[in-house]
Image (tube, coloured by chain):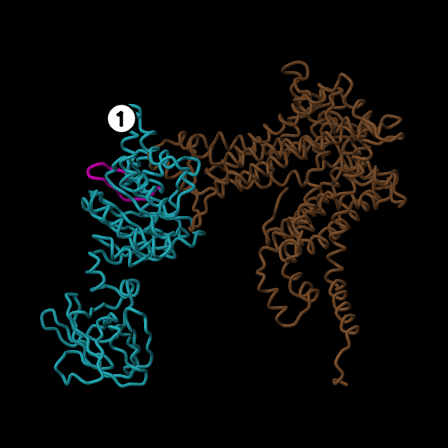
Amino acid sequence: MLRIEQLVKTFEGDRRRRSRRRKQSEDDHAPTRVHAVDGISFDVEDGQLFTLLGPSGCGKTTTLRSIAGLEKPDSGTIKLDERVLFARKDRRTVNVAANERGLGMVFQSYAIWPHMTVFDNAAFPLQVMKRGSRPSKRDIADKVMRVLEVMELHQLAERQATKLSGGQQQRLALARAIVTEPPLLLLDEPLSNLDAKLRESLRFELKRLQRELGITSIYVTHDQIEALALSSQVAVMSEGRIEQLGRPREIYENPRSRFVAEFIGTSNFINGVVADRQGDCFTVETSEGRLLVNGTVDVAMGADVVVSIRPEAVDLATRSWDGTVPNEWSGTVTNRAFLGDSVDHVIGVGKYHIRNRSNPSISVAPGTDVYLCMDPAKLSLVPLEG
Amino acid sequence: MATASPTFPSAWSRRLSTGLRGLLTLKALILLVVVGVIAYLALVPLYYLLWGTFFGEDGFTLDGFARAYGDGRMGQLIFNSLAFSIGAAVISLVVGTGLAYLNVRTDVPFKGLFFAASMIPLIIPGILYTVSWILLASPDIGLINAAVEPIVGGSPLNVFSLWGMAWVEGLHLSPIVFLLMVAAFRSMDPALEESALMSGANKWTVFRKVTVPLARPAIVASVLIMVVRSLESFEVPALLGLQNGIYVFTSRIYFTLRTYPPDLNAAGALATGLLVLAALGVLLSNRLGKGRNFQTVSGKGFRPRRMELGRLRGVMGAGIILYFILTVLAPLAVLIYTSLLPFYRAPSMSVFGEMGLQNYRELLDMEQAGTALKNSLILGVGSATLVMLFMAIAGWLVVRSRVPGRQIVDQLSFLPLVIPGLVLGLSLAFVYLRSPIPIYGTLFILLIAYCTRYMPYGMRYAVTSMHQISSELEESAQACGAGWWQTFRRVLLPLLSPGLIAGWVYIMVVSFRELSSSILLYSPGNEVLSILIFEQYVNGQFTVLSALGVVMVLTLVVLVSIAYKVGAKVGLKQD
């Protein structure tokens, strides 16, 4: 459906906020140019919701705007099915203008035109179509009303757009983006301007709509929960590169780098050395004892690794399991926090402070000696970078 | 002796004395003085203007109106005023908006020149700007006319016409429109245009259906402000219009007062008419500016996408160079050129041989010139200091205090904004011709005029910087036990100082070159620089005038660059 190959976009060096990565002057750019997008490639399948996730300045929005045609990449290819939207190789450039790409886009600020009514906002993309392909006035009205109805805005059609609430503006922006039934929908942090409650309900709404309408979408966000909840595929980006690409569960359970593990959810990191491997089961020697970890990562024997342990993978008990479970450690509770739907403990084990998250029925006072058990299937092995 | 229970009278008197003490605190005293001064400055001139207009020697009269508006030239006067001010507003709007759009939204070259050009109205006072255009485009002596005469035969440009007046005023105002529209375009979320592009609209449709409607409130407000400013303008109509008898309100007022005997009633009637027009314009632009505010603010810092001009880039670049030459280089160059000549004429080989510094030497010998420079500086520093001092306190009163009626103080201090300079001069003349205080004909009356005129700007600076300071800082000082004056002096003033200094420098600069109030209030021996230039013009002394102008511009460059340095720290405001 959409194919991105080796996309590169650089900016003038003084705009430091976009990315911090500087490249030496090996390529044809001046050394002061900052690589906002540094040679990324990915494919988006039909009907998918593909998420670009990362901290601010990682290049996710630049990538999206390049697909939209609002930024002109330095090199690379952007193809929609067989149609080349952008290609630059050896000084030959194809660059379809943004208004001729026929994509739908929702902006972070919604960009609802304040001088138009709700209806006019949604009808604009149809009204500006080329004379030959433009539907008749009646068809436009039908189409607009249908899409407004889907977004539950049909009763507000004649209202001035500025009179809408944040959530309604967001739905109107979405209505405007899909009214022409574009092959691809681009969403630039569409939920980040809403308050927490509304964001949650619209997140599910968005997911339902995307599935019902079957629109292939690219979604940019820095919110990992949004990314996990919505996406069929997630690309975690950092400094202009894709760190890891996969289904949400894959990325959460098997982060392939420390950056991904840290950025998505919280994690405990234990350093160690690979001591043994039996099929998919590694034994890692750490300063506090052995850990069994299931994984498919390709690491050599004796390699330095980091074991990433999610807080909810740590089970807590005041009595020992006496060796009936793997990865049993002991320690002392140093801190406890009640969070309503769960209880967090921090357990001191040797030089590490391991965070656990458990059911609110388990609550252990600080100072108590406890036993931990960590399911090997829920741990993951992260190769040390560099 | 804490045993005796208080008797009734002593308790009563104690309550009375604490009540009185509450009223007579330092705070109340200072506030009272400040409010009194503001009210005096804003209201008294207006009162006397009306009084002087409607009351002659034998009580109430409408004769002034009859004489001012009664003669057959009234239609012509109104036509000229409107044609001049609307023409100037349109020229400044087209030029200023175009430049602002190019600057903010496109990859046009020479962006550095824009902001150099936008400093021009501050650096070249209207009177010098007008004189330099006379030197460039007068039918008799204009350099441009002299240059093209061999080609076209005759003088194609005549600056002494309605068109010439609108052109000069419009160009001089265009940098102000530029700054207003740059602010408007910058605060417009570029996503609004981008989403139109993504909807499939081409650039022209985006411009027509999104950009222009969104900028419309700012455009309308700028037009009104420019119309009002042109209506109030004195330099251009006086220097260019009087030559061929093209009168507008301001020049007619001036003319009425300069004929003998001066007809105060008639001048007052004209001034009242002008005041009403100006006030209407200001009110309307405020109303429109507030009503439909489309500026949508998003959480993300805008990253404006610069439109690529492509092949047009060169054309636009050439246009900008031309604009820069027309508005900045040519007026300055012709002033410098003239200042070096023994008498004014078009450049040729022999002229360059005669060039020298004799005009500057003459200035040194001219006692008046030194006095005028000194007076201008004294008045600039004096009015800036007084205004900022009072406005700092008034600003606190308006923003922070809970005193009932504080909004009235706010509005009073903004009132002079609608009073044209010449009208203010006339009103003050009315006041102090009748007043027993002998300040008419001294520098002091000019000081009062400048303080009144620039009070609104001082207030704006003070209020803006007051808003930037959290009230908790003040409250915590009070919680530490500091009194009101201590809090003001030790916490607020230091925090406000960047904004107050910026306002101070701005008022200093504009006072330094004030003409339209001064022209009715100065007396021989008390000239300021701009008056001296005006006198030189009336005497036809173009070369000495130009030398004086160069000195004035250089002084202003120094003042404005200080202002810019200071202003950069607090966000320079332009007016």
List x then y, in percent, for residue A337: 33, 74
Q: Which amino acid does label 1 sit on?
A: Ser
* Shown colour of chain B: brown
Q: Mark 1 points at which residue?
A: A133
- In this rendered view, identify the residue nearer to me: A140 or A7: A140
Picture residue at 78% right of the left edge, 25% below the top: B65
Picture residue at 73% right of the left edge, 60% below the top: B28
Is B243 left, or right, of A369 in this rendering? Answer: right
Helix, strand or loop: magenta stretch: strand
Picture residue at 71% right of the left edge, 29% below the top: B236
Q: Give the range drawn in magenta.
A: A72-86
List x then y, in percent, for residue A117: 40, 35
Q: Can residue A386 be seen in this view?
A: no
* Shown colour of chain A: cyan
**Numbered disc total:** 1
Q: Can residue A185 be seen in this view?
A: yes
Q: Is residue A154 above or below residue A134?
A: below
Q: In this view, does B66 lie above or below A323?
A: above
List x then y, in percent, for residue B211: 45, 35
Is B244 left, or right, of B368 in this rendering? Answer: left
